[in-house]
């Protein structure tokens, strides 16, 4: 389970698959962004080496 903060991610390069427990499977690649909410439970699968910018906020 993820911590108590929001995490914003902007993908610079690479590809990943993010699967929330009991939820959808989503894939992200260069140019995509997303927010992981506090308490996120799931799996991050790196499909290609990922470079990202990320910001954590409470």
Image (cartoon, rainbow, N blue to C red):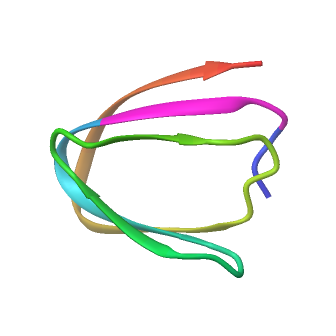
Q: Main secondary structure of the magenta part?
A: strand
Observer-nearest of 28 and 2:
28
Question: How many numbered callouts?
Answer: 0
* x 80%, y 58%: residue: 1
Q: Is residue 2 above or below residue 38?
A: below
Question: 30 or 46, which lies in front?
Answer: 30
Q: Is residue 9 magenta?
A: yes
Name the side, left or right, on which 41 lies relative to 42: right
Q: Which residues are magenta?
A: 4-10
The image quarter containing residue 40 is bottom right
Using the image, determine if residue 5 lies above or below residue 25.
above
Across and down, in percent, residue 36 comes to 60, 44
Q: Position of residue 32 (x, y in %)?
A: 26, 43
In percent of the image, x 74 and y 64: which residue is there? Answer: 41
Q: For this view, does 53 lie left or right of residue 37? A: left
Question: Can you say whether 43 is above or below 15 in the image?
Answer: below
* Residue at 78% in and 41% down: 38
Determine the residue located farthest toward the front in the rendered image.
24
The residue at 53%/76% (across/down) is 24
User: Up-down: is 57 above or below 8?
Assistant: above
């Amino acid at each position: 389970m993820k911590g108590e903060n929001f995490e914003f991610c902007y993908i610079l390069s690479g590809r990943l698959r993010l699967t929330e427990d009991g939820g959808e499977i989503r894939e992200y690649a260069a140019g995509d962004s997303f927010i992981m909410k506090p308490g996120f439970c799931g799996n991050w699968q790196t499909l290609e080496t990922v470079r990202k910018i990320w910001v954590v906020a409470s």
